[in-house]
Image (spheres, grey):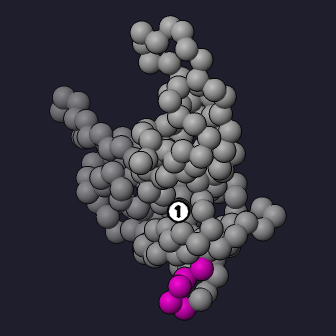
Amino acid sequence: MINTTELRAGTTFKEGGEIFEVISYQHTKIGRGSANIKIKARNLKTGLQVEKSFTSGSKVEEAETKKKKLQYLYKDNQLAIFMDTSSFEQFPISLSMLGEKEKFLREGEIYEVLTSEDVVLNVELPKLITLGIAETGPGVKGDTVSNVFKDAILENDLKVKVPLFINIGDKVKVDTRSGEYVERVK
């Protein structure tokens, strides 16, 4: 059991049979009353964010989680198939659980995966990923006093705004958290 005052961002705990990861933690004390702990947590099975309140001194069950490095193999119907490269054990993950992360998965790449009792809870992507430009319009000269962007489609069919100097075939870095262009790769 974990004391609720020990919960911090990134900590995992179990409540009501569900596993949660703490996103933010706030400890408040009002006058002579007992302290309250408010956390924002993400349900690792469903991906939904919830806000929870605890009184100081209460305890929650500790979730036993492990981080593994798994290789992404392929997408099959509504599943993404990952494999442990040492044991060759395969782990199917529903695309609905992955959400927007699915767009950034590349076959053959190794990803860090959070598991509990051999059930995959979360796939952690690198913050930046390099992708090629598949389609983009020509840069139109004109008002270039400020930053001017144009639409581009990446090799994974993701649409992003890129600067005018980016052409088809260029490699760019994209932030996997926001899906936005970061810089051109030389």
168 left or right of 143?
right
Q: What residue is shown at x 50% (from left), y 18% (from top)?
A: 148
Give the vertical position of 63 relative to 51 (above or below): below
Principal secondary structure, stretch drawn in magenta: loop
Name the residue rendered at 51%, 48% in the picture: 171
Q: Can residue 15 be seen in this view?
A: no
170 or 4: which is nearer to us?
Answer: 170
Specify few, some or many for label 1: CA neighbours under 10 Å numbering under 14, 14-19, or 20 or more: many
Q: List x then y, in percent, for residue 73.
A: 65, 73
Q: Which residue is drawn at 70% across and 58% down?
A: 95
Residue 112: x and y in percent read 46, 68
The residue located at (53%, 26%) in the rendering is: 164
Q: How many labels does the image show?
A: 1
Q: Which residue is at the front of the view, 75 or 59?
A: 75
> Is the N terminus in the top left, top right, bottom left or bottom right quadrant?
bottom left
Q: Give the range drawn in magenta.
A: 83-87
Image coords of residue 160 (percent x, y): 59, 34
Q: In which quarter of the image is residue 30?
A: top left
